[in-house]
Amino acid sequence: MFDARLRPLIDVPLNAIARTLSGTGITPNMITGFGFFLGVIAAACLVFKLDYAALALILASRFMDGLDGAVARHAAPRSRHPGAKSQESDLGGYYDIVSDFLFYSGIILAFAIGRPEHALMAAFLIFCFVGTGSSFLAYAIIAAKQGRSDNEAQGKKSFFYLTGITEGSETIIVLCLLCVFPDFFDQIAAIFGGLCLLTTAGRILQARRDFG
């Protein structure tokens, strides 16, 4: 919901950094991997209830998640495919989306390990993430099969980006809130999980309208 509105604000600093990194040998996939590594460390911090350290690492990880795409668009091509004009690639998009979903669910799993009293609601929230993730990716697969074009409101992507109530920005905000207010994990998880279910239902209806 907020991704398209935030995109013009975050693109300016990301593009500036990407231009600085261009030609240094730092590849988008390196940045993706480093961002995922930071997410793993954030999860470890949550297991040991180091909530504010986890918060800083989550924000750093998501910064890397935005930076990898900007670097891909500005860096000289290294693709094996002829005609490439940048380092944007399907493989990079694949790495990015896989690391994103592992990151989101891994952070919630870490909460459950560190605070087992919240394990039930953590399981519910991961279930809701599966709904948003699967409805998102399944739509992208069919859209690509049918040759549908993306409007790029959230920035240029390697796949069709279907919007919803809960997108990346909202998820990051919720993860940060959980770090700041861990005692309210159940309440935050219940509210956001409900919104995720609404997003999933909306995407299913969208798919029925577009593909039915």
Image (cartoon, helix red, strand yellow):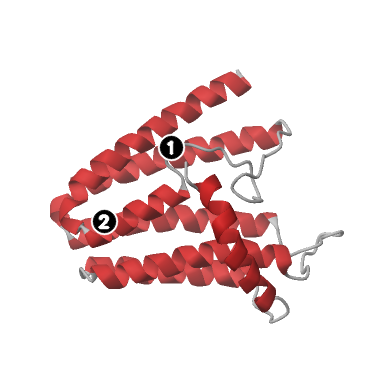
Q: Is 175 positioned to the left or the right of 72 in the image?
A: left
Location of residue 112 by image quarter: bottom left
Q: Which quarter of the image is occupied by the C terminus?
A: top right
Q: Residues within 10 Å of mark 1 (few under 14, many from 20)?
A: some
The disc labelled 1 sits on which kind of residue?
Ile
Q: Is disc 2 placed on a helix, strand or loop?
A: helix
Q: Position of residue 145 (x, y in %)?
A: 70, 34
Q: Position of residue 14 (x, y in %)?
A: 59, 66
Q: Position of residue 98 (x, y in %)?
A: 51, 54
**Does residue 204 lie above or below 8 as drawn?**
above
Mark 2 — residue?
178
Give whichever of discs 1 and 2 has the lower sequence position: 1
Mark sitting on residue 165: 1
Q: Residue at x 78, y 67 (%)?
A: 77
**Does residue 12 lie above or below 156 as drawn?**
below
Tag count:
2
Of residues 41 and 3, the one drawn nearer to the viewer in this rendering: 3
Q: CA distance from mark 1 to mark 2?
A: 19 Å
Of residues 12 and 55, the one drawn nearer to the viewer in this rendering: 12
Q: Is disc 1 placed on a helix, strand or loop?
A: loop
Q: Residue at x 49, y 66 (%)?
A: 63
The disc labelled 2 sits on which kind of residue?
Leu
